[in-house]
Amino acid sequence: MQTKLAHAAERKAFEIAADKLISSASSENRAEAIESYIGLAGKLIGRYVPQVEAGMRRAVYPGSKWERWIFRLADEIDPHVLKTFVMSGGYEAAFRGFRNTVQNAEHYGCNIPWIILFDPTSACNKHCIGCWAAEYGHQQNLSYDDMDRLVTQGSKLGCHMYMLTGGEPLVRKKDVLKLAEAHPDCLFNIFTNASLVDEAFCTECQRLGNLVFSVSLESFEPEVNDGRRGDGSFDEVMAAFDLMRAHGLIFGTSTCYTRDNIERVTSDEFFDLIIGKGCRYAWFFHYMPVGDGANADLMPTPEQREYILNRIREVRGYEGGKEIFAMDFQNDGQFVGGCIAGGRAYCHINARGDVEPCVFIHYSDANIKEKSLLECLKQPIFMAYRKHYPWSENHLMPCPMLENPKVLPRIVHESGAPSTDYVSPESVETLISRTEAYAAAWKPAAERLWKEMER
């Protein structure tokens, strides 16, 4: 939507600010560089997120925890990697990209995501217990041309943030690097078990600069982590952290919390371990009972969910907590207006090419191997998401499957979307039968907490 000349001028201003921050990393002037960045962010996206500048100023001020976090990035990350992260992830994806996807959504009359998750392959070199992705089997792949076409089309719509899931994305290591090099204005976040991270790969990632890593980790205790992920997995992750840190790369963790591990993966010991290893962020994902044989008993109790909601906010608070940016995919709906699936902010594309509303909602009637990305975003199930949203004003109950199980069947049946679980297809009624009791149990706590937050 933006002219090439205006884009170039705006990008240059952002680049000058980035250079100022990075070059002043060890000087007394770096606080000034942060101040200029905050002001620039307000100018770029303030119209669409009015509170962005005020929120950043509240978090980042002289001597604050988050100023120290930013200074550590400037001191410890490779300068090329940091600048590329700021330009591709900060400017192109978060600021300009978000703005353009909002404008394009209005223009095309459908949801346009500013983040796209896709699976290069369904293959994986691990056999982790309870992994829903294992339901997809190991035979499906997106070709390099499929991925390149997807990113090219997505960029034109304003999407410059891509998260690669699977399977294990690094089974396709060469194609992942080739894709990142072909699209330097995009940021690629790789969700990985880290077992295939080696010296040569890290050297290439350092050269390219536009890849970051979210590494699966289940505990600070090797035996607990390896009980799910296989013998030696913990040591592989620790070795990968050391390699990535030595090359000045940006990385964090990705953890699924369940009834069995929720206290362990939010403990001081866990956070202190990953911070000490150089992790900059930590993703937390609520266990979803998706796929054949899924165990609904692994979902957290209402008391546990309330605990992790408060714990993650404590960890990333303006004061205290830990110097790591922790995100809770389920409980942070308050900050993104509820459910972000169905293309509202993100969508998922599996290794067969099916474009799904969410990584946990496996229904679709559009495939990127047969249609353009824009055509896929206009498929009936995505339009049904757009039509029925919001299904809850309480953003602590954001999901149409987990907390609003009556909503998802309405969307699926209205759209006629078939199951895309091509190993064990299941009806939407079977899926929500695992979440109805959970939704009823969580609702009273969610309503109480939401009222407290609105005060």
Image (cartoon, rainbow, N blue to C red):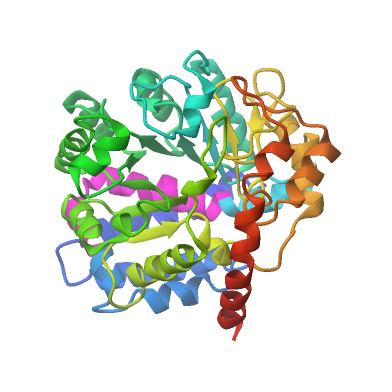
Image coords of residue 40 (percent x, y): 46, 66
Instruction: Indicate whether 202 appears above or below 85.
Output: above
Chain part drawn in magenta: 71-97
Does the magenta portion include 215? Answer: no
Q: Quadrant of residue 351?
A: top right
Q: Residue at x 77, y 31 (%)?
A: 417
User: Which image quarter: residue 60?
Assistant: bottom left
Q: Is residue 81 magenta?
A: yes
Please give the name of the residue rendered at 53% of the width and 23% of the height, measured from the top-left corner.
Answer: 136
- Quadrant into which the C terminus falls: bottom right
Q: Main secondary structure of the magenta part?
A: helix
In percent of width and height, residue 19 lies at: 30, 55
Residue occupying the far bottom of the picture: 455
**Image x and y of residue 101, in percent:** 64, 48
Q: Nearer the viewer, residue 137 or 37?
A: 137
Q: Is residue 23 visible?
A: no
Tell which of 212 and 88 is nearer to you: 212
Q: Is residue 138 left or right of residue 50?
A: left
Q: Does the image show residue 79?
A: yes
- Rendered residue at 26%/41% (across/down): 225
302 and 145: which one is in front?
A: 302
Pick whichever, 130 or 324, lies toward us: 130
Residue 251: name its quadrant: top left
Residue 207 in the image: x percent, y percent?
26, 32
